[in-house]
Structures are given as C-alpha cells and as structure tokens.
C-alpha cells in the first residue's frame, strides 16, 4: 500500500512540475527573486505588471526597472527553442532544440517598442528608456536588434548593467521621483478603457527611441 501511495505522490509531483502553469509560476518566482525587491540604497526600483493610460490607449508592461542608468521596460515571452528573425520582420521562427517542429510568432520587438513610446509620454523627465524582449525559457537567440535588446532571463541582468556605459546617469532623487510617478500611475483607474497591447508591425521602430 505504501508503495502505491509513493508512486502516486511521485506521479502527482511530475504532473505538477511539468504543467505549463507550474512552469510559468516557476519562471515568475525566479524573476521576482532576481529583480523583485526594491533596493533604495542602490537606487534600484522595480515594478511588476504595470498598466497605465498614455492619453490614447491603455498599456501593460510586464516589468519596469528604474536605476541610475535609466528606465528599463521588460516584456516576457514564453517561447523556447531556437529563436530566429530580424528586427523588422513581421514574424519570427521558433524551432525546438531537437529541430522536429517549428512555429512562428509575431515579432515582439514591435510590441516592446510601442510600449516604450507610450512609457516616454508619462515620464516626468526626458531620460533614457530601454526595452528588452526577454524569453523566460531555455532559448538560443539568433536575432540581431539595435533598438531593443533580445535576451533570455539568464543574461537579462548583464544587458541592464551594460547600459551604464552608454547613458547619462540619473541622480538618486530623479530615480526615486520616476519610481513614484510610475507607481502612482497604477493607482489611477481607467475602467472605461480596454487594455490594448500593440503587437502589429507599425513604423514605431523608425521613431527615435
């Protein structure tokens, strides 16, 4: 009897950890562990699931990090395998690591770029705003993008730290003020507005970021 119970428990654990919901929760836990805490003493602030109204539409950004290098908007994507595509392609190709199946996905650079344009409209200062397409599964990225960084969860932090070499540093007070403004945006209710995430190839990528 104990043997049967043990097998049942093991099967239950396998089902739970192999389920898409469990994988999503695990990735979120990893991300929140890495980036989820505000560290005021290091001028590092984080916001998750940020929704706001930019004057014409409602926008949702998965994660925003504010530090002395600027504002970093991160879009998370769950595809895994080999990611191939161009910065201005309409679709990207996703192939499993074993090369047995392949699918296409809409180019996420357009989505993140449109989110950056909306975010810049609500910021209190004219600051550097960086966008990241981040895959939270094991991926091999074969994409070149000059405007938006395409990375994985594993190397995301390195991409963020690398920006200190190219940007004018913000003062600690400016970092805190930007965080407070974005935090207050979430308190404002726009229930009459539908949440619309732009994910169609517009010419936003041609605008100066």
Image (cartoon, grey):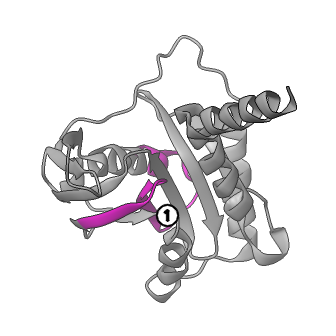
Camera-nearest residue between 110 and 97:
97
Q: Quadrant of the image for the C terminus?
A: bottom left
Camera-nearest residue between 155 and 194:
155
Give the answer, above or below, for where 103 lies relative to 120.
above
Residue 138 is covered by the magenta coloring: yes
* Residue at 49% from the left image edge and 82% from the top image edge: 162
* Residue at 73% from the left image edge and 59% from the top image edge: 33
Give the answer, above or below, for where 39 lies relative to 28.
below
* Residue at 47% from the left image edge and 68% from the top image edge: 128
Q: Is residue 203 left or right of residue 63?
A: left
Residue 72 is covered by the magenta coloring: no
Is residue 102 shown to the viewer in this render?
yes
Camera-nearest residue between 14 and 120:
14
Residue at far top of view? 192
Q: Quadrant of residue 102?
A: top left
Q: Secondary structure at mark 1?
A: loop
* Residue at 63% from the left image edge and 39% from the top image edge: 14
Residue 78 position, x and y percent, is 43, 44
Q: Quadrant of the image for the N terminus?
A: top right
- Which residue is label 1 attached to? 126
Residue 72 position, x and y percent, is 52, 62
Q: Is residue 53 left or right of residue 11?
A: left
Q: How many marks?
A: 1
Chain part drawn in magenta:
118-142
Q: Quadrant of residue 90?
A: top left
């Amino acid at each position: 009897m104990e043997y049967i119970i043990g097998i049942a428990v093991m099967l239950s654990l396998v089902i739970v950890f192999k389920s898409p919901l469990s994988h999503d929760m695990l990735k979120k836990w990893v991300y929140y562990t890495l980036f989820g805490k505000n560290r005021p003493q290091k001028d590092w602030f984080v916001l998750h699931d940020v929704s706001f109204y930019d004057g014409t539409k409602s926008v949702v950004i998965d994660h925003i990090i504010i530090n002395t290098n600027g504002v970093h908007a991160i879009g998370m994507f769950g595809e895994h395998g080999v990611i191939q595509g161009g910065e201005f392609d309409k679709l990207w190709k996703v192939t499993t690591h074993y090369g047995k199946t392949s699918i296409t996905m809409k180019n996420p650079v357009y989505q993140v770029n449109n989110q950056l344009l909306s975010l810049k409209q609500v910021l209190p200062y004219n600051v550097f705003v960086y966008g990241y397409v981040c895959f939270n599964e094991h991926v091999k990225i074969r994409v070149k993008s000059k405007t938006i960084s395409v990375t994985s969860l594993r190397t995301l932090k390195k991409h963020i730290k690398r920006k200190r070499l190219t940007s004018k540093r913000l003062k600690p007070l400016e970092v805190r003020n930007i965080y407070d403004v974005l935090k207050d945006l979430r308190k404002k209710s726009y229930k009459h507005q539908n949440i619309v995430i732009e994910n169609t190839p517009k010419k936003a990528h041609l605008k100066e970021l």
